Amino acid sequence: MNSSNFSRRGLLRAFAATALTAAPLYANAAGVLRGAGDVRRVRMRNQRTSEQIDMIYWIEGHYIDESMAEINNFMRDWRQNEAIAYDRRNIDIIAATHRLMETDEPYLMLSGYRSPSTNAMLASRSRGVASNSYHVKGMAADLRLSTRSTSQMAAAAIATNAGGVGRYGRSNFVHMDSGPVRTWRR
């Protein structure tokens, strides 16, 4: 073997080219591998109803139907007592953000699902409520923690790179949704 054919730099270039070509496959594999033995948990208290949840809702790549039904009910529009199938991706964002902040304190949920009539009523009272809100689609939650600032919560939610994150400093909550990745402050 000629050492010039197998230089360290040449091998590194070949490895880098292979890694770049295979990156999408590795990204998908990581998602599948992450499910092996993975457990997802959500902990929240509803500000309006005082209900609490602390449950494992996903194990080894599978959502637990009974847990998801309980989460749907917990996230309901309390004004109308109306629930829908809440977007599982948003629960994943909420759980991942909570895990990143390394706290055992449950979230205080200010708003989850909103029926169209509730959202219209809130929009008529505040210019900060979008008429096409992700809350109406069951894809958003407004959350608070007493042990973390809105800046810390927003930074953790942004780190998930998985949806919309709105920081409402004066009202002391963070909006997390499973829509397009974007950020804002009010």
Image (cartoon, rainbow, N blue to C red):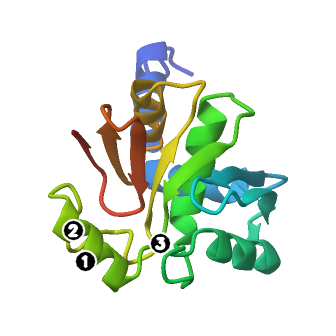
Q: How many marks?
A: 3
Q: Which of these two is toward me, 176 or 75?
A: 75
Q: Are marks 3 and 2 in contact (CB under 8 Å)?
A: no
Which mark is on residue 35?
none
For label 3, the SS is loop
Structural distance between the alpha carbons of marks 3 and 2: 14 Å
- Foreground residue, 4 or 174? 174
Residue tagged 3: 113
Q: Are marks 2 and 1 in contact (CB under 8 Å)?
A: yes
Judging by the rendered image, the residue that carries numbered circle 2 is 123
164 vs 38, left or right, is left
> Quick check: can you spot residue 1?
yes
Residue farthest left in this picture: 127
Amino acid at the residue labelled 1: Ala
C-alpha gap between disc 2 and disc 1 = 5 Å
Q: Residue at x 81, y 58 (%)?
A: 56
| Label located before the other in sequence (3 or 2) | 3
User: Label 2 is placed on what type of residue?
Assistant: Ala
Q: Quadrant of the N terminus?
A: top right
SS under mark 1 = helix
Identity of the residue drawn at 50% across and 14% down: 3
List x then y, in percent, for residue 109. 55, 53
Q: Residue at left 56%, top 75%?
A: 76
Is 27 situated left or right of 174 in this image? right
Mark 3 is on which residue type? Tyr
Give the quadrant of the C terminus.
top left
- In the rendered view, tell whether residue 34 sits above or below residue 184: below
Q: Percent position (x, y) of residue 43? A: 72, 49
Q: Which residue is mark 1?
A: 120
Crowding near the residue tagged with mark 2, few <14, some 14–19, many ≥20 C-alpha atoms within 10 Å? some
Q: Nearer the viewer, residue 90 or 173?
A: 173
Residue 31 against residue 170 in the figure, above or below: below
